[in-house]
Amino acid sequence: MDFSPPTCEITHIECVTTLAYALCTSVRGLLRGALEMDTATSYLGLPLSHPFMAGACPLGWHLDSIKRLEDSGAAAIVLPSLFEEQITLAAERRVRHMDPFEQEFAGALSSYPADSDYALTPDQYAEHLSRAKQAVKIPVIGSLNGTSAESWLSFSRIIEQAGADALELNLYEVVTDLDTPGAAVERQLCHIVKDLKEVLKIPVAVKLSPFFAAFGNVARQLDAAGADGLVLFNRFYQPDIDIKTMTAVPQVELSTSAELLLRLRWLAILHGRVRSSLAVTGGVSAPIDGIKALLAGADAVQIVSAILRHGPSYLSVMRQGLERWMEWHKLPTLAEVRGRVSLEGAPDPAAFERANYIRVLQSWKC
Ligand SMILES: Cc1cc2nc3c(=O)[nH]c(=O)nc-3n(C[C@H](O)[C@H](O)[C@H](O)COP(=O)(O)O)c2cc1C
């Protein structure tokens, strides 16, 4: 009698069982590892279960995508910005200081979007925020985008009343006036933050450009002005030139990890030296980038391009990547990760930066 088929069958069953057992064990191992890793962090005084949050982007315009972001594991969400220009137009029929009915401003105003091009009016924005708050449990951060210390800032109170957990203030500006000195720009930023802190109870984060002669001092001034968080850095949507039409072509391109390095440098320099929390935005494209930002000193990691590219579920990929890495390195809490590769302990950070610069240039071999 040939017993080989049943033997084979038993072997097959055994194999399946062994495989299933191995799979269960490793899944359990993974889960156990994942559960043991404490990824909790605090950003702007808000407790977050992990540092990966959705930055300001169009996904925040729709309640269903906001819910999807939460379901996909976002620790918090920043809504897209309401612009100073929209607020002044709605409230005072002017765009910044320009009256649309005055001929002298016609040229400058023609490059702004029409009223109807904005996703929401200021009132609708407040209503949307309030609905978003009711729809999800994670913190919802409102975003204002502007540069003048004027009446439009009072809209921040409406954002607060709508239920925002915090406000992110994007101070995006390209200073083209050749008579404006850097110190005047810096004073203006601090003025805005102080004004906001006087009227708001919710925390205020400031999203900044890196283009200051002494960014560290700007960070310190904003910290002293009361900024609860600094978001490093705004990406500049730099127009290209079309040589066929000889015109400037504005464009939005999603970021890559190459943009992260500037952020890592400043996170590492600021970590432990300012009271404000630190968030990174720009160039976090994969779990390894998020881990680097945390090692440099970020309290929170904002992600936009990666979730526009791969979908909201990429937030869980980021979190799982961090947990596995922490497990591998036997670092059970985020506190043991954050700032581990910062300049906090460096006796002379400027000398360290300069020495590295010289070493890197000297290392090139022809
Ligand atoms: C399509 C798009 C829309 C954006 N809208 C806003 C916005 O309304 N307010 C804002 O502060 N940043 C906005 N950003 C910038 C992002 O919040 C983020 O700072 C930037 O994309 C860098 O992060 P990333 O490298 O993860 O994409 C937008 C970015 C993109 C790609």
Image: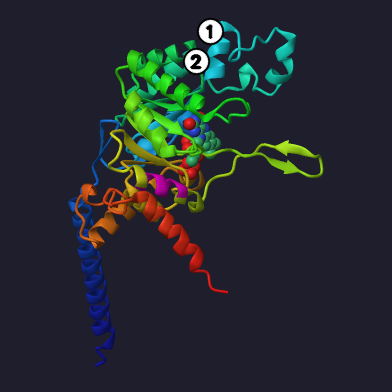
Q: Which quadrant is home to the N terminus? A: bottom left
Residue 25 position (above or below residue 52): below
Instruction: Report the side of 332 relative to 311 (left or right).
Output: left
What amino acid is labelled 2 in the image? Pro
Residue 251 is drawn in which quadrant? top right
- Magenta region, main secondary structure: helix
What amino acid is labelled 1 in the image? Ala
Residue at 46% across, 27% down: 186
Stretch in magenta: 262-268
Q: Is residue 267 magenta?
A: yes
Residue 58 visible in rendering: no
Residue at 73% across, 15% down: 106
**Where residue 350 is drawn, which disc sits there?**
none
- Ligand 1: does it lie within 8 Å of the C-beta at label 1? no
**Where residue 91 is drawn, which disc sits there?**
1
The residue indicated by pointer 2 is: 122
Q: Are there few (<14), some (14-19), or many (20+) residues within 10 Å of tag 2?
A: many
Residue at the far bottom in the pictured view? 1
Q: Nearer the viewer, residue 164 or 174?
A: 174
Label 2 residue SS: helix
Answer whether labels 1 and 2 touch (C-beta < 8 Å): yes
Residue 117 is drawn in which quadrant? top right
Rounded to the nearest angstrom, the CA distance separating label 1 from label 2 is 9 Å
Residue at 51% across, 38% down: 211
